[in-house]
Amino acid sequence: MPKTKMNLDKLVSRTKIYLITIAIILIILSVIEPKAIIPSILTYIFIVLYTIWANNKRKNEIAEHINELTLSVDKAAQSTIINSPFPLIVIDTNGNIIWKSSNFIKEFANVDIKSTLNDVIKELKINVEKGKNANNISICESMKIGDKSYKIIAEYTRIREKEHKQHSSEYMTTIYFLDETNHIRILQEYNNSRTCIGIVVLDNYEELMQRATEEEKLKITSDAEKNIYSWVNKYNGLLIKSERDTYVCIFDHYHLEKIKEDKFEILDEIKEIKTNDNIQLTLSIAISEDSKNNLDEYKSAKAVIDIALGRGGDQAIIKQNGKYYFFGGRTQEVEKRTRVKARIVAQALEELINGASNVIIMGHTNSDIDAMGASMGIYRIATTIGKEAYIVNETNGTSLDYFIKDLKETKKYENVLINKNEALAEINEDSLLIVVDTDKKNYVEAPELLNKTDKIAVVDHHRRGTDYIENAILTFHEVYASSACELVTELIEYAEKPIKLDTFEVEALYAGIMMDTKNFTFKTGVRTFEAAAFLRKCGVDIIKVKKWFQSDLKTYNKISEIVANAEIIDDTIAISIYDKEDSDANITCAKAADELLTISNITASFVIGKMENKICISGRSIGDINVQIILEKLGGGGHITVAGAQIEGMTQEEVKQELINRINEYFTEIS
């Protein structure tokens, strides 16, 4: 139609040119021969009249041709709709059926199609309301009808005024049903046949081999392999031993849901294998189904196994469609007595410091004495090697008041503490950024610094989450350690260049260990005491350290009030709400949670406080309940006995109810 109109316009335009040309010729002829004026006028009138008649005739012929063509197209469209090879129905927006094809009648003879299409009709009304002035509206969605799956394509068209009077609705809907049952079946078969790659690691293999007799070594390895092979065979998988303590397994995706349902029973089975000293063998398992090819899936599985080991082992993690699914991980971390890794990391850290222009050290937000003590230890290592070093800190709270005051009063440290803006000015591509007491990207003191250099080292002892710093070139991550200060003390002990600690640095490291172990009562292993003994030899003023932990009377009264208001659930878990506006709410809640554990029969405690626009939770346990798993479900993390979380967009009462739900969920999972 547009093409025909364009041709007609061209014809009319060309005729005008001809008429003008003829007029010019006749005028010239009349000037030359005046006798030709009248014949020229008559001739021109005749030509104009003929042209008008010819154009009208041509227009009528074209219009007739267009009408015939439109009629043919309408007939073809009607024929196509009536004889549609797939089911088709026409309804109005109220769901009243106007017309249905023969294939539709045949396909859905026993189906109440009106009730089946209720959701489509509802969506139609919503779309019509949104696009009232639109002539055409369409949606496309999938739907299961009976045993078959269909793609529903609905086209909504405004009814003409004449037809609108005959219907209660302003819109008419044409719905096409495309059978995609076979397509879905083939897609499902393809997905089920996709491979999932997993890695299985014996967590404490080296420890067991060092402490077991020759006879025990053979029995442990054979029993472990027998159990692992049996578990993999149960799901028709393939297992390959890649190292003494590491296996690679391959499963079909079809079995992955079954593995999730069974909750990795192999984790409990493997713990039945023990030495004569009653030391259990534990497993870590990582399975990835998150990449397009096998090589990428293997790389993904290696990254996931690092998370499992970083969370203390004895657990399984599945990475699927970008999400992580955690299983197990409820037992206490097993302390590793060998210090080989500490020696290797100490040497590697010295090499990195030597190659850096300067060293920037930072801990986590709302810093504590463990993060600051570890930072002071790293500061001394860097300055001993001869590099400028700075500690990033912007925290002002009761937990660090006395410590920061003493630090600033010591002249040699007057330029050591810097804020975020000063750190951004000091850091460059050749700087070494060392993160202590956390490995979470969004929990560091200044996340912007992570993007300013590729040289990043991490020293941490918390159970690893999924948002850890992935691009660190050196990681000293040991979840068995009591504190970051314990790990830094070991790095100082095994440094190639002798490190002489100043008294303040020794006391800071000792204070960090004291805080995280609650005066050597929680999470304290052999290596913790060895680190503490090393620091005592360096000279520690215990009285001065204890002053850093003193609370004023006001804080003590707050803690007493929180303890008094505690509610006991399940006979052994204490939950209390601290509803006062307090800039140090997280510190107060942590101290109150510690205090609640001193009450008999209390095995776990949670204190909920308000911190600016967030709700904070401090969780503590004597070891029977894993508070880390409970608070991880609320976006937090930590250790089995010490954990925390921060939540936005909820009230304290809502957080309390959500916490109770997560506690109940925890007990359901372990039952």
Image: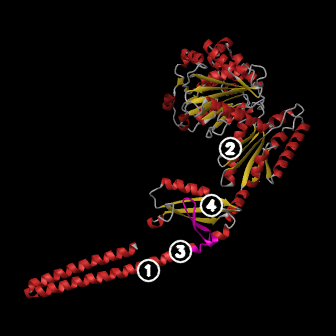
User: Which residue position is annotated with label 2?
Assistant: 324
Question: In terms of image quadrants, where is residue 635?
Answer: top right
Horizontal and vertical percent position of residue 260: 76, 47
Question: In terms of image quadrants, where is residue 642?
Answer: top right
Task: Tell me the amino acid under the disc marked 2.
Answer: Tyr
Query: Earlier along the polypeptide chain: callout 2 or callout 4?
Result: 4
Kind of element beneath mark 1: helix
Q: In this view, does 473 lie above or below 385?
A: below
Task: Tell me the amino acid under the disc marked 3.
Answer: Gln
Q: In this view, does 274 lie to the left or right of 190?
A: right
Task: Decide: few, some or many residues near mark 4? Use Cα within 10 Å; few <14, some 14-19, many ≥20.
Answer: some
Task: Tell me the amino acid under the disc marked 1.
Answer: Glu
User: Which residue position is annotated with label 1?
Assistant: 68
Q: What stretch is highlighted in magenta?
A: 82-103
How is the model colour-coded? secondary structure
Q: Is residue 157 above or below residue 306?
A: below
Q: Is residue 321 above or below residue 141?
A: above
Cβ–Cβ under 8 Å for marks 2 and 4 = no
Q: Residue 78 carries which label?
A: 3
- In the rendered image, is residue 598 in sight? yes
Q: Distance between the residues labelled 1 and 4?
A: 39 Å
